[in-house]
Image: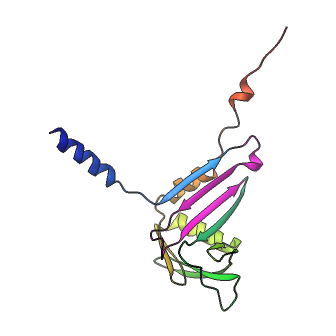
Amino acid sequence: MKYWLFSFFILVLTGCHRDGWHHSSIQNGNATYDMAKLIHKASSPSSGMDLEFSRTGSMIHGYINVHAFELPSFDGDLYATSLTIETDLATKTFVIPLLEGGQRARLTDDCLEYLLQTLELKPHVTLSSGYFKEEVNSSRFVLHMDAFQRSNSRIRPQHMINFELY
């Protein structure tokens, strides 16, 4: 009976649904230098891509990353690639700058704004660039984005300790 219960428990734990989002943050004494990162990992290391949002202070930047090959260049421009954002109802393509090495591209402000809005409103979003394609489950994106943008309380233990000498 114990072994059956233990194996059932392990099965339940391994069968839990993960939505692919990972959040990390670094808090500093000065809010201007607080950092946070929200990543949706690639489903496949060879044909998928990571979606990454990084925040420093109040500035948010977005990136796509691939692991196996370089992102394809856009119309012969070695410093640009295209990113297509697709939902059930709409498809929109953006030209975004490639970073050195060709495996990482930074989302432009227009692309970032459209992508954030789409992830908040639609439960599934498909990103593609050349032969790379990633399906993003965005059903819980708002919760992850709230954690990403939240900064911890400014009350720190070191600010609460006072020593007085008489």
* Residue ranking furthest to the bottom: 75
- The structure residue drawn at horizontal position 69% and vertical position 85%, both measured from the top left corner, is 78
Instruction: Say left or right for 62 vs 138.
Output: right
Q: From which residue to which does the magenta span run?
A: 28-56
- The structure residue drawn at horizontal position 70% and vertical position 71%, both measured from the top left corner, is 109
- The structure residue drawn at horizontal position 18% and vertical position 42%, both measured from the top left corner, is 3
Q: Is residue 78 above or below residue 1?
A: below
- The structure residue drawn at horizontal position 54% and vertical position 63%, both measured from the top left corner, is 120
Residue 50, percent from left and from top: 54, 68
Classify the position of the C terminus by image quarter: top right
Q: Is residue 58 above or below residue 112?
A: above
Front in this rendered view, residue 103 or 51: 103
Count of picture labels: 0
Is 29 within the magenta? yes
* Residue ranking furthest to the top: 166
Image coloring type: rainbow
Residue 98, percent from left and from top: 68, 77
For residue 119, which quarter of the picture? bottom right
* Residue ranking furthest to the left: 1
For residue 88, which quarter of the picture? bottom left
Is 32 within the magenta? yes
For residue 72, which quarter of the picture? bottom right
Q: Is residue 147 above or below residue 80?
A: above
Classify the position of the N terminus by image quarter: top left
Instruction: Say left or right for 31 vs 117.
Output: right
Front in this rendered view, residue 104 or 92: 104
